Amino acid sequence: MAPVDTNYALLTDLYQLTMAQGYWAAGKTREEACFHMFFRDYPFEGGYAVACGMAQLADMVEGFRFTEGDIDYLAGLKTADGRALFDEGFLSYLADFRLTCDIDAVHEGTIVFPYEPIVRVKGSIVECQLLETALLNCVNFQTLIATKAARVCRAAKGLPVAEFGLRRAQGLGGVWASRAAVVGGCSSTSDVLAGRVFDLPVSGTHAHSWVMSFPDELTAFREYARSFPHNCILLVDTYDVVEGVRNAITVGLEMRERGERLTAIRIDSGDLSWLAKLARGMLDEAGLEDVGIVLSNDLDEHLIKSILEEGTPVTSFGVGTKLATAYDQPTLGGVYKLSAVRDAETGEWIDRLKISESAAKLTTPGVLDVRRYYHENGTIAGDMVFDELRGVESAQIIVDPLDDMRRKWLAGKRFETLLAPLARGGEVVLGAEERNAQAARQRAAKGLETLDESQLRMLNPHTYPVGLELGLFERRRNLVAVLRGLA
């Protein structure tokens, strides 16, 4: 169940629709094509990414229709000289349009790397083109947030991290950000809509306004404890942290006498490490050793790492703005590129390649998939991008797409193939387990365990080997030579 209308047909750039009309006018609506979505650079200067957004992509496919209102809107668009932008015949075509394409994608929570396909779409070139913008919107953003969450949760070293960035998130995208944060490792979210829609654990305390609405802090704490005797976390920094902790201790002792328990206090400002140590001492001295300490206030993975390195006595963290907005990197930068078209007469797939002045933007031809190889100890050894229609040479060599001197032999190692069916013939085949955020969270946690420590470090991580299968690399190199008139 999606939190907003799942009719995504107009969630696109105008040029996708103008190209679609061009394909229609040129008689190419039945021409089959293959596109792949991938990204080029590691997010947050890290060593991995956590794939996410496939559940929303499945929702998009299920609800993809051009409604009567959509067609009326498109009919009203004009060219610069006042003529109708879209042909009536093309609009009639869109009114009857239904997806029939095949979509394959990595499962949510899969650890992924640059230059390997995350999503593959095969179908009529019109369908592939019309899906591009919304597909990128789903997968780019949520992969970015899930990756940020994984970094934050890893810095927390197993302590629970609650996501509560909805109020700072970019509109309704914050609902999907909350889900992606849980996929990346967060234990809960403050976002109640996301909790209901995606069956996520929700958590929260109270705001400073609660305390300010009462004549004094102690009264506010007592009233909150009375309302929530079994889920009481008190925010102690509205006026003065030391006095706030004293008032929380008073309430905590009163709750104990009633057979209840003060769950924790939360500190949301100031020197969090110093204040947490001070509060821990005060709580322990009062005999409230079981009362936890929650820290928040513009936290990210770097601040959390620093706090824990100081030996701060913290029970859990609340992370908002810098997680839900991917504060230090606004976009993943994933792209969606044509890699092959199908000959209508022979049925054979013909390579397509985008050549650029930059080697980093050279695309890879074929109908691609990814093999992930493993060492005997279970850590991953390397990812091979290969053409599933041509197979893999027996040597099983991968070549760095940006440096052909860097090669790795993978023969003899256990491997798995990463792309799995998401839709067949336009019908979603992704099951409930594959759409479940908690299952994706577990998948991400297991995937991170397969990385070497050098690939997980925050600064200057080791680059994981991803390469093109040797035969594919040579085919791409030869095709470049032909297209540039060098062969």
Image (cartoon, rainbow, N blue to C red):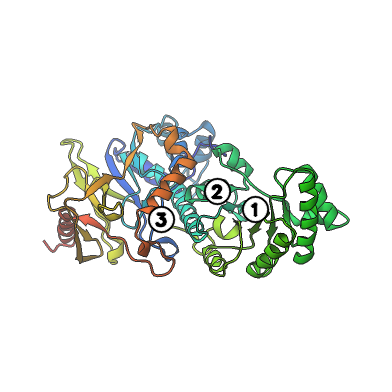
Determine the secondary structure under disc 1.
Answer: helix
Above/below status of 25 relative to 163: above
Task: Kindly indicate whether the residue at mark 3 contacts the one at mark 2 (C-beta within 8 angstroms).
Answer: no
The image shows residue 231 at horizontal and vertical percentages of 70, 45
Sequence-wise, which precedes: disc 2 or disc 3?
Answer: 3
- Front residue of 78/152: it is 152
Horizontal arrangement in the rendering, residue 271 relative to residue 106 (left or right): right
Please give the residue where the numbered disc 3 appears in the rendered image.
49
The image shows residue 237 at horizontal and vertical percentages of 74, 62
The image shows residue 463 at horizontal and vertical percentages of 32, 64
Task: Judge depth for marks 1 and 3 and give the one in front.
Answer: 3
**Can you tell which quarter of the image residue 92 is in?**
top left
Please give the residue where the numbered disc 1 appears in the rendered image.
167
Q: What residue type is labelled 3?
A: Ala
Q: Can residue 470 be seen in this view?
A: yes
Taking the spot 63% from the left edge, 48% from the top edge, the residue there is: 190
Sequence-wise, which precedes: disc 1 or disc 3?
Answer: 3
Mark 3 Cα-neighbour bin, 10 Å: few <14, some 14–19, many ≥20: many
Give the CA distance from mark 2 to mark 1: 19 Å
Q: Which amino acid does label 2 sit on?
A: Ser
Q: Give the position of the C terminus as an image quadrant.
A: bottom left
The image shows residue 84 at horizontal and vertical percentages of 47, 42
Please give the residue where the numbered disc 2 appears in the rendered image.
187
Determine the secondary structure under disc 2.
Answer: loop
Horizontal arrangement in the rendering, residue 226 relative to residue 355 (left or right): right
